[in-house]
Image (cartoon, helix red, strand yellow):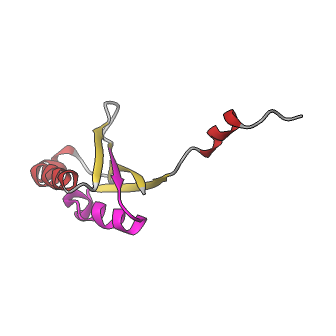
Amino acid sequence: MKYLVLLKPAPGKTAADFRPHMVSEIGAVWSSYVSDELREFYLSSEGPVVTLVYELPDRQAVERAVDALPMVELGLLDRELVHLGPFQQISALFAPPAP
């Protein structure tokens, strides 16, 4: 299953709070990527939001992976998980016309 994860700075956290943990965070993200759990990762150009796309068997596996990230463990980042499913509404394009 595919999951979108948004990571945002926890309220009250500043850039100085994050600096000491950058290398370990990036290393953990890379490790997740090369282990074939994390499919995509992005940094927003409009603000301090990291977007991760995981492909794992279930929500609990994604929660474990995300909660193991150093900055999440330390409470520096808040997370939001969204299950991505098929866009079934597209089938309307192929439905027979109504009589």
- Residue at screen point 27% across, 56% down: 37
Q: Position of residue 84 (x, y in %)?
A: 48, 50
Tell me the quarter of the picture where residue 91 sits: top right
Judge left or right: residue 33 versus residue 23: right
**Which residue is at the far top?**
45
Judge left or right: residue 28 versus residue 5: left
Please identify the quadrant where the C terminus is shown: top right
Q: Position of residue 1 (x, y in %)?
A: 42, 57
- Residue at screen point 73% across, 37% down: 95
Magenta segment includes 27: no
**Which residue is at the far front?**
96
Magenta segment includes 75: yes
Residue 12 vs residue 45, the one in the foreground: 45
| Relative to 26, residue 70 above or below | below
Residue 47 vs residue 89, the one in the foreground: 89
- Residue at screen point 28% across, 43% down: 41
Residue 75 vs residue 43, the one in the foreground: 43
| Relative to 99, residue 6 above or below | below
Q: Position of residue 78 (x, y in %)?
A: 35, 56
Residue 26 vs residue 48, the one in the foreground: 26
**Span shown in magenta:** 51-76
- Residue at screen point 35% across, 60% down: 56
Q: Position of residue 74 (x, y in %)?
A: 22, 63
Number of callouts: 0
